[in-house]
Image (spheres, rainbow, N blue to C red):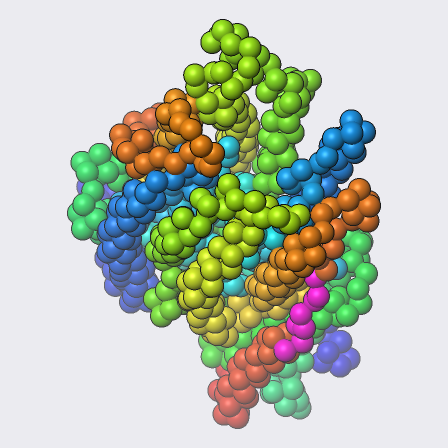
Amino acid sequence: MGRPLATTVAGQQWRLLMRDRRLFLLGFALLLLLCTAGLTGAALHARQEAQRRDGQSEEAQIWAQQGAANPHGAAHFGRYLFKPTSPLAAFDPGLLPQLGTSLKLEAHASNPARHRAIDGGTALDRFGDLSPATMLQVLAPLLIILSGFAAFAGEHARGLLRQELAAGAGPTMLMAGRLAAFGGLAVGLVAVAALASGAALGMAGASVTDFGALLWIMAGYALYLFTFAALTLGASAAFTSARTALVLLLAFWAVATLFVPRIAPSIAESLAPTLSGPAFEAAVTKQMREGPSGHDPQDARLERLRAETMRRYGVSRIEDLPIDFNGVALFHGEALSTSLYRRHFAALYEGYDRQAEIQRGFALLSPLQAIRPWSRALAGSDQHAHRQFLEQAELFRYELVQGLNRAIIFRPRREGAGPYLADVAAITRDARFTPTPSSKREALSRHGPDLAILGAWAAIATLFAFAAGSRLGRSNA
Amino acid sequence: MSLVQLEWIRAWRDPVMRIMLLLFALAAGFAVLAGARWAAEREALVTQAVAEADEIMALRRTDFAALLAKGEKPKFGLVYATALPFRAGLPNAPLALLSAGQAESYPAAASISPFIDPDTIFDAHAAGLESPIVLAAGRFDLAFVIVLLLPLLLIAATYDFWSRDVESGSARFQLAHPVQAGRLILARAAVRGGGMLAAMTAIAVTALLIAGAREVASLALFALVTSAYGTFWIVLAILINLFVRASTTAALAMGTAWLAVTILIPAMSAAAANLGAAPPSAMAYTNAVRAAGLEVRAANAVAARAAATAASGRAYPASLWHSRREIQQRDSRLRPLHEAYRRGRSEHRTLADRLRFLSPAVVTQDALDRIAGTDATRALAFQAQARAFAGEMRLLAFDWMDQDRLLTLADYDSGLPRFAFAEPSRAGPLTRDVAALLLIASLVLTTAAFRLRGGPAKLL
């Protein structure tokens, strides 16, 4: 008896929603925007990826065109890597605009990525983008609030609620039916977004893993939007005035989607500060100069290395070495600077991770703080995916530079002065960089707590809705 | 009791108004603290970058003196002017704590050396290591509070100042009094919204003063921009209240307007700027510069090899004389590439700058960034001045080479030439921003005036 009644209420509410022309237009506009953004984003992504592949191949040709060059000079000329992006980034660009797109690999330095999309911006860039993910995170909850704030309060004002209750529909049944209708609206929005994004992924040449990740992302959004649906109905039932319900819901929306997401990173940064660029470089340079212990100056290290090398080869003069000592010094210097950079970068990334943990705490105030990292991580547009690319690039850089240093160490002995020149393209012929994209499985396990938080929000919001619904029965019976 | 007094009492007795002012004070206080912290860190970052040149020179001086003490002759980088390190830094403007603006999208320092391509002097400072999540979220500074929160609070105070009375029937009673409908509505909106706006502006200025802001002109400009922006929202509330009859509809209309002005129009304008004048490809630029650099190197390969072993017979070795010739060739070969890339970026920026006039929120953000000195124009002026300084330092090194002049201990003690940033004028763009805000507000007010011409009956 109960189920059919709830279904009837849900069906009736659904018809009311569809008949509300203003909401229908708003919803249609949102979906249209979402589909347009998704499909154009995918087309843009496909074009940019093609450009990136061409750019990378051109870069390899430039490296090969160096001809005869001094290997250390070539290591300073360096190579460039242009970062590939996941097809899912068309749905959620995440942190990509703030992360660099190209990386210079050179001797002695582990550079941060450069050419960020935010570089060289104007005041307009302070307002953010309108990606499909942003629409689902910010605009879709607003649509749900506008659709549902009067679901109970409006009917109470018009006296219809009293009639419904008098007709035998229990308050819990009414809430269940309306929650089913509004939950359907939330799931419907997510389903359309998923279909559009799926089509976009197909255009961008995504893999099966990407489609799987998309489903997980959408599961998170379904929980997120269902939370707003339940909170909206709860507020509508808790307050007899539609105006009060609307104002409070809009205030929650503004706090949850605009203010907390901006305050949380600032607080996290002040609680877990990380080094600025110049401070980072200064720390590495100081350790290079004074040694990792702080009491081993560069000159003394070089002198020790010279003595050890001569002892190993059984010679008493550096000129008698069968190898080039300059190459040995460069090789050891590179090993030391690389270990220092890796240690400092690891500390920096740990700082970012600590900041992310602090921000996760703010998910108690706003579910956006859980859906955003969940969505970014699975879309491969978060800091972790970037870090993985940088670490793979760093391994490649080290091998490349040390390969060139080895060429100097074992260079042919010849008469005459002048710099040593070699075919660097031949020396580095086997150096290939093939980055592995970040693992979706790993992202799922790392961000499992975010999904759990979203589940908790949905559960608490549902409990709140039913609790408010039961009070509605007592006050209107 | 006059109309204004009556409305003043109503507003004063409304607890929501007091709560909103308290909320604003808390948000403004936090924003100013966060802004002051950001500005101090920024200043420290620039100071550290600039001090690097002195640190390098101090270390070299120690080596120089040690060699002299041992009776040896200092060589290479210790004596050649071509190895001199210079730094240029963009100092904070007096009201930097107001807005982070575009400061984090542009390099704040430059590492200069006479033989370095002046277009690469910002490379080491182009990408900071700031947390990308913080950059993505944007700083919680006072500009953010003014651009996004202030209109929300003004909307909460005024969204149904008239429609609520129409709904309850009291509007009919008010219009029955011998008072012009236009005056009545304007006075009520001015007292409720204007009072709130004046209080919020005063709170924001006080917060800035407490945080140490002292430049009167910047504070006055800030108050002017905030007032103009707030006036736009009050006038919009008047217009919407003249058209809608229900409080809830007024709330929806004002909410939609806020969403459009602060989120949708800016996002669409940014997308239009990307489509209309897409920024040039950084990949293509990088490859083109590297390929052209290689061409110059290849053309000079034989001469470079010869110079490596040749004797110059002068104070500077033949290899440096060769490098001098080669970098001049390289820079003239690369200049068109750099200029084309800069031109492409400039076209994109110009379009984005023009599109700001579509939204009063973006105009306000732009004005506040300019007052804070964190706008793109100031950052670009720094780049142009630093490049010019790099050119001057190259000429200085060339001059020393021509004179066969090597560095002495006295040169180390007298210090390096220093970069000094000359502030560009902000009067033009700021005037345009304020004029645009006032013009938009006037247009909305004119539309409201047309509605009022229909007589009191149209207002019920």
Which residue is nearer to you in this view: B87 or B31? Answer: B87
Residue A388: image x %, image y %? 39, 31
Q: Is residue A132 left or right of residue B247?
A: left
Residue B452: image x %, image y %? 54, 88
Q: Is residue A248 left or right of residue B284?
A: right
Image: B346 above or below B39: below
Residue A181 in sight in this render: no
| Overall secondary structure of the magenta section | loop
Residue B47: image x %, image y %? 71, 46
**Which residue is found at the position 55% from the left and 57% from the top?**
B118
Residue A309 in sight in this render: yes
Count every numbered label the image shows and give the total: 0
Occupied quadrant, residue A425: top left
Occupied quadrant, residue B423: bottom right
Viewport quadrant of the N terminus of chain B: bottom right
Which residue is nearer to you in this view: A304 or A325? Answer: A325
Which residue is nearer to you in this view: A422 or A97? Answer: A422
Image: A124 above or below A210: below
> What range of the chain is rendered magenta?
B421-428
Residue A251: image x %, image y %? 53, 53
**Which residue is found at the position 60% from the left and 35% from the top?**
A280
Q: Is A389 one of the magenta-colored residues? A: no
Q: Is residue A287 left or right of residue A5?
A: right
Q: Is residue B375 left or right of residue B325?
A: right
Occupied quadrant, residue A286: top right
**Which residue is found at the position 54% from the left and 80% from the top?**
B440
**Which residue is found at the position 81% from the left and 29% from the top?**
B69
